Image (spheres, rainbow, N blue to C red):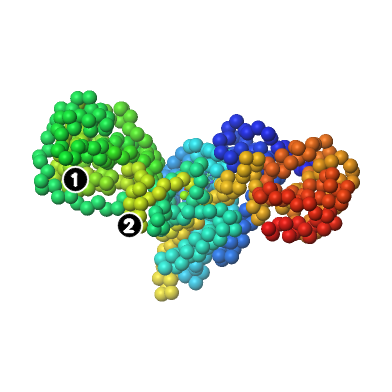
C-alpha cells in the first residue's frame, strides 16, 4: 500500500448516485475522464482482468475462439447493412485526414460476418463461434452510474455461424448455458428474460438481468416461471365482445372534462349507467407520439388505449425500433387540423379517415393497444372542443391501422402464457443473446456451399455480455455501508495484511507472511504504510473489499496475528507461525 497507485477517498464523488459508482471511485478502482468515460487504475484493472478471464474460460470451454477487432472502423460495412444511419446518434463518427468516414464501433456484427465470409466457403467449416473481449463506443444519451452505462465500455461479443436453423438453436443453447455458468461462478443472481431483438433483427432473444433496484430495465415474472423484459411482454389476446346490444354512438357535450378523472365524473353525471358506473377503463384515450426514423423522417402516430392505463414509452420505442419516439408537440399537430387537442377520437383517424386523400401527404397512423378488444364500446374524444362520444364500438364505428404493445404492464396482469399474475421488478441488463438469423449474412452476402453443393446463406447468432457493467453489478451486489466486499474469484487480492503498530519487527513479519502466502498461491496486499493510523488502515481494508485481512499488531509480541473475514466480520487469533495453514482453514468456513 505504500507504493501502490491508490488514493482512497472518504467522501462520495459529487456526481455519483449508486453505491457501486461511489465505492469504485472512492476505492481508486476507476477515475472519471468525461461523462461515461473512465480510466482503470491498478486495483480496478486487476478485477477487470479476472472477470475477463472467467468470461474467456467459459467461452473457450463452449468452443468459441477469441479474435480481436479494431474499434476504429471504416464506414462501408456499416453502410452495407444500413446501420451507418440506422444506429442513429449513438454512433461516434469521425473522418480521417482524407475526409473518409470512420466510426468507433458500437458493436461488430458486420466485421465478424465479413471475416467469416473472407475465409470460409463450405458447410464443413461450420458451425463456428468467434468472440472478442473488446472496447465499444456508444454516445449514450444518458451515461449513468459510472461504468454501468458508459460511453466507452468493455463488451464480450460472440457470434455464431451455422448452416441451418437447427444448428443455430443448438449453438444458442450452448451459449445460453455458458452464460449461466459465468454468472454462477460470479455468484450473481440472474433473471433470464424474454427480450425484444429490436434494431438487430432476428427472432429468439433473451436478456440476462441482474435484479436490482437501481436497474434501468423493468422485467416481470410469474409464479409459473414466465420472465420477460417489460418491453417484450405481450398482452394475452382479449376475446371479441358481442356489441349487438350496444346503442348507437352519441356525441355528448362534456364541459370541464379535460382529464380522464373529470371525464369519468362528467359521464356519470350526464349519462349515468345503472348498476355499472363509468370508470376510467371505459374511456379510450388517444395519445399522439412522433416516431423519428434514423434517416430523420418524422411520422405522427396516435395510440389508442384504455384510459386507466398509461403509455409505456419504452414499450412503444421497442415496438417502433429503430425509430426514436417522443410525445408529439402542438406544432406536430398543425398539419392535421381535424385533430382537436384533448378531444382526439378514432372517427377521424384510422384507415377510414378522409385524410387518406392523395392531396394530404402528411403521414398519420392509428394503432391500438391490444387491451382494446374488437366489439368493445368506449367513451372517447369526438374531435370537437368539450365533446366526447359515447358507445363508440371498435369494429363497428371505427377501425385502426394496426396494433401496438403500448400500455404499461401492471403488477397482477396475467402472464401471456397463462402462468399466473405478473410481479414487476427492476434489473440491470448484463447480457443479451439472440438468434440474428440471416439479417447480416444476407446483407453482406455470407454464403457457403451446403452438402449438395448449393450455395446457402449462413444463419447467425449474437451473444453480448457487458464486462465492465458486470463488474459494477458485482460491486453493487457485494458491498455494505463500509465499502466493497469482493467475492474471492475476482477480488484484487485475497488477503490484505494490515500492520497496526510501529516496531520494525511488525513490518518484517508482515513481509515474511506475505511471502509465505504468495508461495502458497495466495494474492496479498500489505498495508505497510508507516505514518498511517491503524484506524485508517482498517477503514481502507473495508473500503477496498479484499475478502480477508490479517492484522499484524500488538499481538505479535505473544506470537499472535488476527485473521478477519471482510464479509462475515468473523475474527480469529492464530499463532503467527501457523498463520498460513490456519488461514487456509479460515477461508473455507
Ligand atoms: P442497454 O439496453 O442497456 O442500452 P443494449 O441492449 O443496447 O443495452 P447490447 O447491444 O445488447 O446492449 O449489448 C450487449 C451488452 O453490452 C449489454 O447486455 C450490456 O451488458 C452491455 N452494454 C451495452 N451498452 C452499454 C453501456 N453503455 N455501458 C456498459 N455496458 C453496456
Ligand atoms: Mg440488449
Q: Is residue 189 above or below residue 127?
A: above
Quarter occupied by the N terminus:
top right
Q: Quarter-wise, where is residue 588 in the image?
A: bottom right
Quarter occupied by the C terminus:
bottom right
Q: Is 572 placed left or right of 175 in the picture?
A: right
Task: Residue at 17%, 42% (x, y): give it.
Answer: 377
x%, y% of residue 287? 29, 36
**Residue found at the far bottom of this picture:** 452
Q: State the SS at label 1.
A: loop
Q: Nearer the viewer, residue 209 or 282?
A: 282
Q: Is 55 placed left or right of 113 in the picture?
A: right
Q: State the SS at label 2.
A: loop
Calculate the distance from the C-alpha at mark 2 to the C-alpha at mark 1. Answer: 23 Å
x%, y% of residue 461? 46, 59
Classify mark 2 as within 8 Å of ligand 2 or not, answering yes or no. no
Q: Of the numbered discs in the image, which one, if any, rests on residue 418?
A: 2
Q: Is residue 112 above or below residue 243?
A: below
Task: Residue at 51%, 69% (x, y): give it.
Answer: 125
Q: Residue 4, can we see it?
A: yes
In the rendered image, which residue does mark 1 sit on?
Answer: 376
Amino acid at each position: 500500500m505504500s507504493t501502490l497507485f491508490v488514493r482512497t477517498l472518504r467522501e462520495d464523488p459529487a456526481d455519483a448516485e449508486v453505491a457501486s459508482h461511489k465505492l469504485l471511485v472512492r476505492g481508486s478502482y476507476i477515475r472519471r475522464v468525461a461523462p461515461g468515460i473512465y480510466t482503470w487504475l491498478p486495483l480496478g484493472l486487476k478485477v477487470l482482468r479476472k472477470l475477463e478471464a472467467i468470461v474467456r474460460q467459459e467461452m473457450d470451454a463452449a468452443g468459441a475462439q477469441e479474435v480481436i477487432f479494431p474499434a476504429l472502423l471504416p464506414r462501408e460495412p456499416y453502410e452495407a447493412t444500413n446501420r451507418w444511419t440506422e444506429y442513429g446518434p449513438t454512433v461516434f463518427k469521425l473522418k480521417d485526414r482524407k475526409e473518409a468516414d470512420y466510426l468507433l464501433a458500437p458493436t461488430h456484427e458486420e466485421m465478424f460476418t465479413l471475416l467469416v465470409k473472407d475465409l470460409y466457403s463450405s458447410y464443413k467449416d461450420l458451425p463456428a463461434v468467434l468472440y472478442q473481449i473488446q472496447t465499444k463506443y456508444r454516445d449514450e444519451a444518458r451515461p449513468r452510474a459510472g461504468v454501468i452505462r458508459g460511453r466507452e465500455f468493455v463488451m464480450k461479443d460472440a457470434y455464431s455461424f451455422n448452416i441451418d436453423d437447427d444448428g443455430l438453436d443448438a449453438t444458442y443453447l450452448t451459449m445460453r448455458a455458458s452464460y449461466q455458468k459465468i454468472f454462477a461462478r460470479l455468484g450473481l443472481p440472474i433473471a433470464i428474460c424474454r427480450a425484444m431483438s429490436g434494431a438487430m433483427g432476428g427472432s429468439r432473444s433473451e436478456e440476462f438481468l441482474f435484479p436490482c433496484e437501481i436497474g434501468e430495465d423493468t422485467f416481470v415474472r410469474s409464479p409459473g416461471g414466465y420472465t420477460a423484459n417489460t418491453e417484450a411482454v405481450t398482452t394475452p389476446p382479449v376475446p371479441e365482445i358481442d356489441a349487438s346490444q350496444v346503442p348507437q354512438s352519441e356525441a355528448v357535450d362534456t364541459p370541464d372534462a379535460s382529464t380522464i378523472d373529470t371525464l369519468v365524473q362528467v359521464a356519470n353525471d350526464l349519462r349515468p349507467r345503472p348498476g355499472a358506473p363509468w370508470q376510467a377503463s371505459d374511456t379510450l384515450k388517444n395519445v399522439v407520439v412522433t416516431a423519428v426514423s434514423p434517416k430523420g423522417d418524422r411520422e405522427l402516430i396516435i395510440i389508442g388505449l384504455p384510459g386507466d392505463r398509461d403509455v409505456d414509452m419504452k414499450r412503444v420505442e421497442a415496438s417502433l425500433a429503430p425509430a426514436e419516439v417522443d410525445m408529439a408537440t402542438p406544432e406536430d399537430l398543425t398539419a392535421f387540423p381535424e385533430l382537436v387537442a384533448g378531444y382526439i377520437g378514432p372517427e377521424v383517424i384510422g384507415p377510414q379517415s378522409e385524410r387518406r386523400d392523395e392531396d394530404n401527404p402528411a403521414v398519420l397512423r392509428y394503432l391500438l393497444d391490444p387491451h382494446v378488444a374488437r366489439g368493445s364500446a368506449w367513451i372517447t374524444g369526438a374531435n370537437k372542443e368539450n365533446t366526447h362520444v359515447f358507445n363508440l364500438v371498435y369494429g363497428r364505428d371505427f377501425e385502426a391501422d394496426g396494433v401496438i404493445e403500448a400500455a404499461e404492464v401492471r403488477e397482477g396482469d396475467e402472464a401471456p402464457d397463462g402462468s399466473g399474475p405478473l410481479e414487476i421488478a427492476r434489473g440491470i441488463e448484463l447480457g443479451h443473446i439472440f438468434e440474428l438469423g440471416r439479417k447480416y449474412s444476407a446483407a453482406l452476402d455470407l454464403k457457403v456451399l451446403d452438402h449438395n453443393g448449393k450455395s446457402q446463406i449462413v444463419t447467425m447468432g449474437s451473444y453480448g455480455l457487458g464486462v465492465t457493467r458486470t463488474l459494477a453489478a458485482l460491486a453493487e451486489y457485494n458491498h455494505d455501508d463500509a465499502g466493497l466486499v469482493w467475492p474471492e474469484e475476482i477480488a484484487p487480492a485475497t488477503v490484505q495484511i494490515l500492520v497496526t503498530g510501529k516496531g520494525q519487527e511488525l513490518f518484517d513479519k508482515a513481509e515474511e507472511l506475505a511471502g509465505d502466502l504468495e508461495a502458497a498461491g495466495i494474492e496479498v496486499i500489505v498495508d505497510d504504510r508507516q505514518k498511517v493510523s491503524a484506524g485508517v488502515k482498517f477503514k481502507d481494508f473495508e473500503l477496498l473489499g479484499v475478502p480477508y485481512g490479517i492484522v499484524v499488531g500488538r499481538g505479535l509480541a505473544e506470537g499472535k496475528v488476527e485473521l478477519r473475514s471482510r464479509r462475515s466480520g468473523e475474527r480469529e487469533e492464530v499463532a503467527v507461525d501457523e498463520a498460513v495453514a490456519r488461514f487456509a482453514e479460515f477461508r473455507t468456513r
